[in-house]
Amino acid sequence: MEERTCYKNEVVIKEGDQGDVLYIIDSGTLSCTKVLGGVETFLKRYEPGEAFGELALLYNAPRAATIVSDGDSVLYALDRGTFNHIVKDAAVRKREKYETFLQ
């Protein structure tokens, strides 16, 4: 994971962009908005310990919303390759656990 510092009003992800990173918030808060019916609508405030950006990695889809830093924030970025490795490794471990149980 790579540490990333964001400053007040910095756009971290923009709705419609291609996503290749998952973010985990270490400090600060970020606001999530989405354009609905032509109007920018506030959806959620992200707090430390929360993560966002996983949908673009899981489904190879464009970013579903825009996330902007409310103030100075520290995020940890997890790239697509590492994310996929973690997900695949967890699936293999789960399958091996069930195979052992069934044996």
Image (cartoon, rainbow, N blue to C red):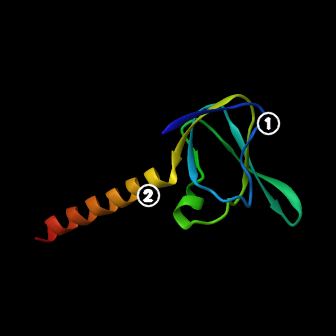
Could you tell me which residue is drawn at 73 percent across and 61 percent down? 16
Could you tell me which residue is drawn at 52 percent across and 37 percent down? 2
Mark number displayed over residue 9: 1
Quarter of the view holding residue 6: top right
Q: Which residue is mark 2?
A: 84
Disc 1 is placed on an element classified as loop
The amino acid beneath tag 2 is Asn
Could you tell me which residue is drawn at 62 percent across and 38 percent down? 47
Q: Nearer the viewer, mark 1 or mark 2?
A: 2
Is 75 left, or right, of 16 in this rendering?
left
The amino acid beneath tag 1 is Asn
Is 29 left, or right, of 23 in this rendering?
right
Mark number displayed over residue 67: none
Q: Is residue 70 above or below residue 12?
A: above
81 or 72, which lies in front?
A: 81
Quarter of the view holding residue 15: bottom right
63 or 45, which lies in front?
A: 63
Could you tell me which residue is drawn at 74 percent across and 52 percent down? 14
Q: Quadrant of the C terminus?
A: bottom left
Residue 55, given in percent of the width and then of the height, sits at 58, 60
State the count of labels: 2
Q: Earlier in the sequence, mark 1 or mark 2?
A: 1
In this view, the residue farthest toward the right is 38
Disc 2 is placed on an element classified as helix
Q: Do the CB atoms of the residues marked 1 and 2 lie less than 8 Å apart?
A: no
Q: Is residue 41 above or below residue 5?
A: below
